[in-house]
Image (cartoon, rainbow, N blue to C red):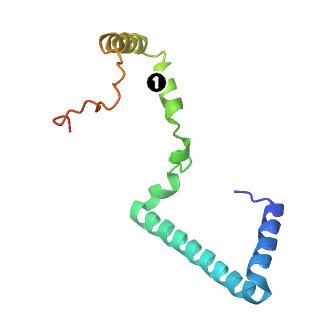
Amino acid sequence: MSIDFNKILIIGIIAVLLLGPQRLPMYAQKLAEFVKAVRRFADTAKDRMREEMGPDFDDVDWQKLDPRQYDPRRIIRDALLDSATGATATSVQAAQVTASRVRATAPLVPLAEGEAAPYDSEAT
C-alpha cells in the first residue's frame, strides 16, 4: 500500500488548520496510540491463526483468498465462455429461449391512473 507524500502533507496542513497548534500534539498522540493498538490486534490475530492452523498457516496463499478479486461479471463471463464443456453454449441458448417465451407470454400492461399494482399475498 503506497501513500503519496503530497497527500500526507495536505492532510497534515488541514489538521493544523482545523485543530490548531494547541490540540494537534494531543490528537497526534491519540492517533499513534490507535495505530499501535490496531497493529497489536493484527499481530495477535495472526499469532492466534498460526497457533490454530499449525504449520499450514505459512503455506496459505492469502492473495488467492482476497475477496476483492471476485468480480461477479468475470466469474459469469468465464463460466459462459468455458469451452471445456459443450453444455454451456446449449444452456445459454436454452436460457435465451426461456426468457423470450416469458416476455412473449407476459406482456407489460400499464396500470390505469389510481389502480393498485397486482400483489400476491401468498407469494411470500
Which residue sits at x=52%, y=56%?
A: 58
* 102 versus 57 height, above or below: above
Tag 1: Cα neighbours inside 10 Å, few (<14), some, or many (≥20)?
few
Location of residue 116 by image quarter? top left
Which residue sits at x=56%, y=77%?
A: 37
Nearer the observer, 29 or 121? 121
List the residue tagged with mark 1: 79
Q: Of helix, strand and loop, which one carries label 1?
A: helix
* 59 versus 9 height, above or below: above
Which residue sits at x=36%, y=18%?
A: 108
Q: Quadrant of the N terminus?
A: bottom right
Nearer the observer, 109 or 100? 109
Nearer the observer, 107 or 16? 107
Inspect the image, locate mark 1, and give the three-letter code of the amino acid beneath it: Ala
* 114 versus 22 height, above or below: above
Nearer the observer, 57 or 70? 70
**Residue 82 position in % (x across, y down):** 48, 19
